[in-house]
Amino acid sequence: MTTTPQQILKSYFGYDTFRPMQEEIINHVMQRRDALVLMPTGGGKSLCFQIPALLMEGTAIVVSPLISLMKDQVEALRANGIEAEALNSGNDEAANRIINERLMSGKLKLLYVSPEKLMAGLQWIRSSLKVSLFAIDEAHCISHWGHDFRPEYTQLGQLHDVFPDVPVVALTATADKVTKADIVEQLKLRDHKVFITSFDRPNLSLDVKRGYSSAEKLRKILNIIANHPNESGIIYCLSRKTTEEVAMKLGRYNIPVGIYHAGLSAKERNIVQEDFINDRINVVVATIAFGMGIDKSNVRFVVHYNMPKSIESFYQEIGRAGRDGLPSETLLFYNVQDMITLRSFADESGQKDINHEKLNRMQEYAEAQVCRRRILLNYFGETSDMECHNCDICHNPPEYFDGTVIVQKALSAIMRTSEQIGFTVLVEILRGNMSADVVEKGFHTLKTFGVGRDVPARDWRDFLLQMLQMGFIEIAYNEDRHLKVTSLGREVLFGKRNAKLSIVGHEDLRKKKSREKKRPAVPVLGFQMAEKVEDKALFECLRELRKRIADENKWPAYVVLSDKSLHSLATLKPTTIDEFGKAYGIGDYKREKYGEIFVEVIKRSI
């Protein structure tokens, strides 16, 4: 009989070892004690309550904010042979009645429910069910300081009043110190412990491109898509309009894309989400409205077309890539216009000061000249003094040159316009462009008109960002976002101080990249053999088989077997069902259910 967390881990989920802190959290919860778990997206939060649910008497109630997220998790549990259901507004009365009967008969180990449904049925649950634990997923939603506050979550503080002896586990991927304290207070956690695992996601590459024009952004995105054939990716945009424009441009290159933003109907959004989860489309262009309900493990790239409003938001969004632990790509485009727009949003928000502070931290990340992963980890209180060797700064450390003359040209142009211009017009003056704005205001007659013709527009945009970062100029948001020369900038302008600039790296965006990417070796757990090379043709055959099984069951493909499991099988080529069961991520249930058909395909390939 399966009685230990370790046995459950292997028999149901197919893993030989726990990730850091998982076992400690599971044992803590099984002692019927409360917990706050901070673990990055893809770090294995779900196992921290799913395994105790399977070992403890009764049914675990899991609070989840989105129907799509519940659906994904329930499907994944069922695919592992675990009895689970979801009560939500998407069910009809007959379905809910069947679920209630299964609950009362003790046949369900996990029930997923929205906070509203839970609170409405709290007394019925108290009188009719044996509850093993409450798991509050996306717990940052309960906090006013969290980046996705939801009023309906605030009633969950009543759980301990009604169920004083049932443990409450709160789980989230991102929460700063203030948000953590607020979650504990709002949920009235008792005898609790806070578990914070490493926020490091070493499989995610981190890249920032500064000052790209829309045409340059498009070329870069097309290169990324070409480097990930038949693989999934998300492109985040700041506005609905930009979302639709980017999707339209990609459509011109015959790339099937979905559009997702709050301006679409619920039905339209659900269709796009289902198409993406089930691999009918590989790319979604979306606002931040998209993603919380995505439990898709095989997203291979996340692009931020515009800068996010905070590091918390950014980290959660890039965390949707590579949840299966395989190498995945993240890219952030950064320019001053995004900063101006986001500062305007912060000014209009109800928490102006804290939102400005969060935006400042995001800006520092985008403009950094040191390892980006160190910045992210330090932000979340995890000190790191090591370079990651998987970000753009580590790959190409900045080189500096004496940029005093370049800075003086820009500062002089600003001063000669009486500090009445923004970034766009400044670049036009420096480059000698006879634009309507330049001619209308007579800026083409200035002595500085055209003094920077030898510097490409993109380089000027980058140099101006560096000047802003170094404090030579500032933006007067209360004066139509005009540029002002600071006292430090005047010292450079009048020759009292030199200025160093970093060399702008140039990438040939028109050059076709190889479609074949070298994959790092897939870790093979529990099946020790001589080192083997992955059979890529076999991987594609296994992926086709997985897709057929998924379509028959109306499941996402990754619910059947993860990409990591397929890579493991394509490397090891097991020829017996027992060997199949020793591959990564394959438990007893999946071994018995899928072993024969997968082994047959593998045998034919040998």
Image (cartoon, rainbow, N blue to C red):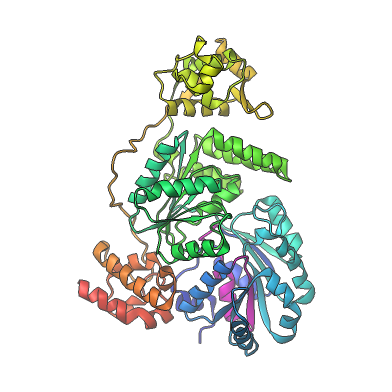
Could you say which quadrant of the image residue 476 lies in? Answer: top right
Q: Residue drawn at (56%, 46%), measured in percent from left and top? A: 239
Query: Residue shown at 53%/29% (left/top)?
Result: 465
The quarter of the image holding the C terminus is: bottom left
Magenta stretch: residue 186 in it?
no
Q: Nearer the viewer, residue 440 or 293?
A: 440
| Rendered location of residue 398, percent (x, y) | 44, 31
Q: Can see residue 330?
A: no
Vertical placement of residue 250 versus 401, above or below: below
Specify start and end residues of the magenta stretch as a single range.
40-66
Q: Position of residue 561 (x, y in %)?
A: 40, 71
Residue 45 on the magenta segment: yes
How far across and down, in percent of the image, does residue 579 sit?
A: 32, 77
Residue 96 appears in the figure:
yes
Q: Is residue 139 left or right of residue 331?
A: right
Q: Is residue 396 left or right of residue 95?
A: left
Residue 87's place in the image compared with 394, above or below, is: below
What is the quadrant of residue 196 in the picture? bottom right
Q: Residue at x 31, y 69 (%)?
A: 544
Q: Quadrant of residue 433?
A: top left
Foreground pick, 233 / 533: 233
Tell me residue 111's x, y (percent). 61, 77
Asked whether 251 or 547 is in front, the reply is 251
Q: How many marks?
A: 0
